[in-house]
């Protein structure tokens, strides 16, 4: 199993550009989520999904869109990048209950100039 | 909204000694789960230990144990016989029905 994979590992954008961060898992997990990690603030939940076709907002959803058309994939879209979105982004997945361990991808470091 | 607070930005411990990392949280939910994650310089998030709120018994995983005080909303992590490989950022996390909240983290240094 590859676990949770994220692409790209690094990305530099200009303000106003759009892009999609890819996340895939091969563990047949129902729950998937996106976090951003900023210095001194830990991880903050952006969006999550409890299954294909179902998504919901987390703590910091503004400026990001998600969709979940398959169990395996959960892409995160930045519609119009802003410098405030410079961060490290983590995708995670787990089985369907809150007690289940979340498995994290390796992260994407995004810089918006 | 639920909040998680880690009041120790940095801690250090001598190799083979014991260290305790603090975490408090705020919630109105009765059913929830608490986690400690480790993030080494590789940036990979690794689950260290989890605690179910409905269980009074403190969780233990080898050298890692927690002191869970539900009434005080406190969830500290004790690392015994510290090893150089324990050096990392440690995050306390709360998970309710679907939302997951992390603390700001504690950077642990292990001195040889």
Image: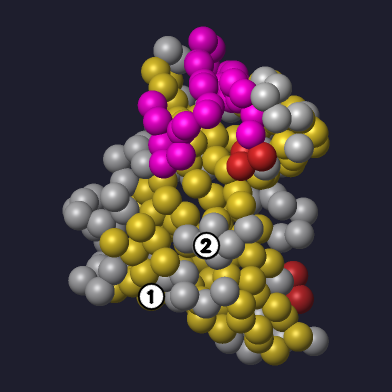
Rate crowding at label 2 as few (under 14), some (14 to 19) or many (20 or more) other CA atoms within 10 Å. Answer: many
The answer to whether residue A22 of the structure is visible from this angle is no
Q: Tell me the SS state at disc 1.
A: strand
Residue plotted at (69% across, 50% down): B44
Q: Is residue A43 above or below residue A81?
A: below
Q: Specify the segment rendered in magenta.
A: A56-82
Place of residue A36 in the rendered image (x, y in percent of width and height, measured from the top left): 58, 43
Of residues A12 and B15, which is closer to you in this image? A12
Are discs 1 and 2 located on one and the same chain?
A: yes
Residue B1 highlighted magenta (yes or no): no
Screen quadrant of the C terminus of chain B = bottom right
Q: How many marks?
A: 2
Residue plotted at (54% across, 58% down): A41
For marks 1 and 2, give the CA distance: 19 Å
Q: Main secondary structure of the magenta part?
A: loop
Left or right of B42: which side holds A78?
left
Residue A61 highlighted magenta (yes or no): yes
The answer to whether residue B108 of the structure is visible from this angle is yes
Q: Report in which chain the residue with disc 1 lies.
A: B
Q: Is residue B89 above or below residue B80?
A: above
Q: Tell me the SS state at disc 2.
A: loop
Residue plotted at (38% across, 26% down): A56
* Residue receiving disc 1: B67
Of residues A34 and A11, which is closer to you in this image? A11
Place of residue B81 in the rendered image (x, y in percent of width and height, measured from the top left): 64, 83
Q: Report in which chain the residue with disc 2 lies.
A: B
Place of residue B70 in the rendered image (x, y in percent of width and height, measured from the top left): 25, 68
């Amino acid at each position: 199993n590859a676990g949770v994979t994220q692409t790209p590992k690094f990305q530099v954008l200009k303000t106003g550009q759009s892009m999609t961060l890819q996340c895939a898992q091969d563990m047949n997990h129902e729950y998937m989520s996106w976090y951003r990690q900023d210095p001194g603030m830990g991880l903050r939940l952006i969006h999550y999904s409890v299954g294909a076709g179902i998504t919901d907002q987390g703590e910091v959803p503004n400026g990001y869109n998600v969709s979940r058309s398959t169990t395996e994939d959960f892409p995160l879209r930045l519609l119009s990048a802003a410098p405030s979105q410079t961060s490290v982004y983590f995708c995670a997945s787990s089985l369907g209950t809150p007690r289940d361990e979340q498995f994290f991808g390796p992260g994407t470091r995004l810089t918006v100039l | 909204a639920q909040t998680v607070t880690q009041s120790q930005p940095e801690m250090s411990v001598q190799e083979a000694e014991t260290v305790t990392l603090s975490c408090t949280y705020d919630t109105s939910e009765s059913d929830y789960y608490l986690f400690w994650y480790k993030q080494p310089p590789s940036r990979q998030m690794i689950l260290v230990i989890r605690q179910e709120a409905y269980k009074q018994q403190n969780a233990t995983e080898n050298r890692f144990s927690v002191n869970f005080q539900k009434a005080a909303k406190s969830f500290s992590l004790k690392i015994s016989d510290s090893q150089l490989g324990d050096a990392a950022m440690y995050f306390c996390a709360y998970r309710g029905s679907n939302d997951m909240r992390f603390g700001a983290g504690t950077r642990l240094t292990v001195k040889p």
